[in-house]
Image: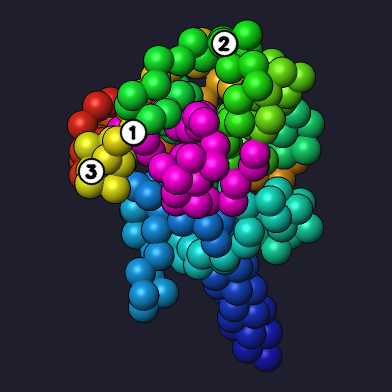
Amino acid sequence: MQKLIKTLTAGCLFALAAHNAVAAEKIVFGIALEPYPPFSEKAGNGAWSGFEPELIKALCERLQAQCPLKEVSWDGLIPALTSKQIDVILNSMSITEEREKVVDFTAPYYQTPAMWVADASLDLATTPEGLKGKVIGVQGSTSNATYLKAYYAQGSTLRYYTTQDDMTADLQSGRIDVMLADALTIEPLLKSAGGSGLADKGLAPKDPLFGSGIGAAVRKGDDALKQQLNGALAAMKADGTYDKIRSRYFSVDISAQ
């Protein structure tokens, strides 16, 4: 009888451990509904591709975790994280002081400067004084938008966009005069037929409002998950996995040093 009880007890403990292991292996990553190529884009069959979906896949293989992607609007990502609908945001989110009041971040996994873009024929001074009276486009709820609000809102008209494609279309049609966007997303556009007539008008200066790089966000106090992600990212950089993925999308090193 004692042997039977021990066997049953061991079996129950094994089953409980297995259940907990399965639960721990599921990490839900939030991804913005709005495409952001080459970082993320969605195919007609519903599959996500791009630098960050590939990075997520490699991370989860290393962590031996099941990582479904939950689609959320960009503005809703942090609320979805804090309300436990998702566990991680690895979706080009800048690490800023304002966001760090609400969520915790891993170490930055990439960085990108902000670039001014306008019609190639225009000669623009991109200072607040130089763009006085101009209409400036920017994607909403981004560090670029925060920067423009702080320095350009008084003298210029700011127009906020949900997607880069919509903003580019308005720039090309003359509905805005200039736009501020992440350089890594703009460089491929300027080299393509879709960016015909547009030109790089310089980078915005470094500013604390741009944050300290792009990191993965987790809920406040979720230190175990943050450490897991940091460890996996560091290992991927050390063994060349990160650079292998990066090289498929960018010709320059974007890793945060």
Q: Give the range drawn in magenta.
A: 159-188
State the residue at coordinates (42%, 29%): 118
Q: Residue 136: x percent and y percent?
A: 59, 30
Q: Which of marks 1 and 3 is in front?
A: 1
How far apart are the two marked residues, 1 and 3, measured between alpha carbons?
10 Å
Disc 3 crowd, CA 10 A, few/some/many (<14, 14-19, 20+): few
Query: Please, is residue 97 above or below residue 234 in the view?
Result: above
Q: Mark 2 points at which residue?
A: 130
Q: Name the residue under label 1.
A: 198
Residue 92, magenta (yes or no): no
Q: Mark 3 points at which residue?
A: 192
For badge 3, the amino acid type reads Ser
Q: Residue 29: x percent and y percent?
A: 55, 57
Return the residue nearer the eye: 190 or 79. Answer: 190
Residues under numbered marks 1 and 3 in contact, where contact means CB atoms less than 8 Å apart:
no
| Disc 3 element | loop
